[in-house]
Amino acid sequence: MNLDTRILIVDDDEGIRSLIGEFLAKHGYETRTAADPLEMRAMLAGERFDLIVLDVMMPREDGLTALRQLGRDAPPVIMLSAVGSDVDRIVGLEMGADDYLAKPCNPRELLARIRTVLRRRAAAEPDAAVTSNTTLALARVADVDSGECLHFAGWRMDLGLRLLFDPTNALISLSDGEFRLLRAFAEHPRRVLTRDQLLDWSRGEDSDHYDRAIDVQLSRLRRKLADGQGGSDIIRTVRNEGYLFVPSVGPTN
């Protein structure tokens, strides 16, 4: 079932590369290995991969630096690190990792994480294609508005059409999970929200997987807001408490 799924394992420890590679191969995945980020980039330039398992602690260039340099079209990434603190995990997710696992890890847990990330990506891609085609078409129509909108800091969130526009009226493409999460924030502005509250208010039909994915959804949502005009400080982290949606929200401009 996984014969067409190709995984790239990047680690400076040859023993770990071999162990992970052989284990995943036994479960039907095609695996390749790279000893450092330089070799990883060379392989990515010439081959297709569906997922990268990337070590953090490597000499010369660490995994986080390598992760930062990956483009938007890069395959999903699971980080492995001997430093397994919450701060390091959050930093990895904020930088674009799809999951983060502390070393030494049980190969079966890594396998489960890989399957979850690949399943999540496969589920998102058809939705993203439909959303992209729909939103591009809608973006060509002047003053797209369902009449059911929230406004904050010059942004417009159309709840009916499930679209988000920045203050320049540029369309910001969001996945279904990202839109639900932003709606939870916008409907509870200017108050600190805990992770559990965000889960309660934004989970969809796939709630079992969403529990594990919300950190990724949040980091991606914040990056997309930052890509828009004036969106870099819309969602603020409140240390040891949760997250704060900074602007006030109104139904009209």
Image: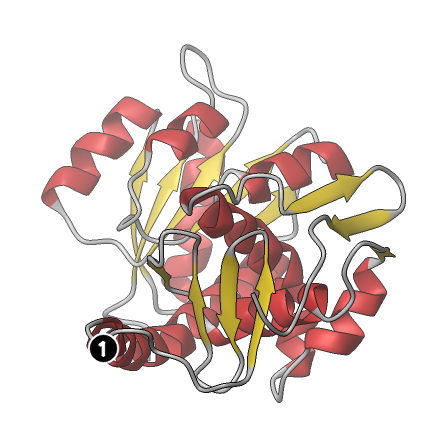
**Front residue of this view, candidates 144 and 17:** 144
Image location (x, y in percent) of residue 76: 40, 53
Image location (x, y in percent) of residue 162: 46, 79
The part of the image, by quadrant, that contains residue 240 is top right
In the image, is residue 30 above or below residue 100? below
Q: Neighbour class for label 1 at 10 Å: few (<14), some, many (≥20)?
A: few
Residue at horizontal 53 percent and vertical 29 percent from the top: 56
Amino acid type, residue under disc 1 in the picture: Val
> In the picture, which quadrant includes the N terminus?
bottom left
Image location (x, y in percent) of residue 172: 39, 60
Q: Is residue 32 visible?
A: yes
In the image, is residue 229 above or below residue 184? above
Q: How is the image coloured?
A: secondary structure
What secondary structure is found at the residue carrying circle 1? Answer: loop
Q: Residue furthest top?
A: 60
Q: How many marks?
A: 1
> In the picture, which quadrant includes the C terminus?
bottom right
Q: Is residue 45 left or right of residue 70?
A: left
Q: Is residue 241 left or right of residue 47?
A: right
In the image, is residue 36 above or below residue 218? above
Q: Is residue 190 left or right of residue 101?
A: right
Q: Is residue 98 visible?
A: no
Residue at horizontal 35 percent and vertical 59 percent from the top: 169
Q: Residue furthest left?
A: 46
Image location (x, y in percent) of residue 154: 52, 54
Residue at horizontal 43 percent and vertical 44 percent from the top: 229
Q: Residue furthest right?
A: 241
Q: Which residue is mark 1?
A: 141
The part of the image, by quadrant, that contains residue 103 is top right
**Front residue of this view, candidates 6 and 222:** 222
